[in-house]
Image: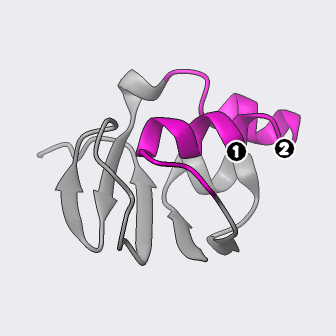
Amino acid sequence: MIDVLYFAWVRERIGLPREQVETSAATVTDLVAELKTREARYAAAFADVSALRVALDQELADFDAPLEGVREVAFFPPMTGG
């Protein structure tokens, strides 16, 4: 079981700030593919992963990063300065 957190517009599109996901995904990309098949709102949120960043256990990671041993996955848009 993995805690999946959604921030900013990702949270708005999915309608949840976080959820626990039972997954057999090996990588973040695999997890995204699983989530996209759930409902249209997930497909919309993950339609363009180039507009997203991911953190595994609160450390930035790539979408090809393995999920083995990971307890938390967070998806969010890139940070902008200002």
Magenta region, residue range: 24-48
**Res 50 quadrant in image:** top left
Q: Is residue 73 left or right of residue 10?
A: left
Q: Are marks 1 and 2 in contact (CB under 8 Å)?
A: yes
In the image, 28 versus 77, the foreground residue is: 28
- Which residue lies most toward the right here? 39
In the image, is residue 16 above or below residue 43?
below
In the image, is residue 29 above or below residue 73?
above
Q: Is residue 61 left or right of residue 11?
A: left
Secondary-structure class at tag 1: helix
Q: Residue at x 71, y 30 (%)?
A: 44
What x and y, as percent, mark residue 3?
55, 76
In the image, 52 versus 67, the foreground residue is: 67
Amino acid type assigned to the residue bearing label 2 in the image: Arg
What x and y, as percent, mark residue 46?
59, 33
Q: Residue at x 51, y 21 (%)?
A: 48
Callout 2 environment at 10 Å: few (<14), some (14 to 19), or many (20+)?
few
Which residue does the numbered mark 1 point to in the structure image? Answer: 35
Specify the quadrant that holds the N terminus. Answer: bottom right
Q: Is residue 37 left or right of residue 7?
A: right
In the image, 36 versus 64, the foreground residue is: 64
Task: Give yes or no for residue 37 being in the magenta stretch.
Answer: yes
In the image, is residue 10 above or below residue 45?
below
- Which residue lies most toward the left here? 81
Q: Residue at x 56, y 46 (%)?
A: 31
**Res 43 quadrant in image:** top right
Q: Is residue 74 left or right of residue 36?
A: left
Which residue does the numbered mark 2 point to in the structure image? Answer: 38
How many numbered discs?
A: 2
Secondary-structure class at tag 2: loop
Amino acid type assigned to the residue bearing label 1 in the image: Leu
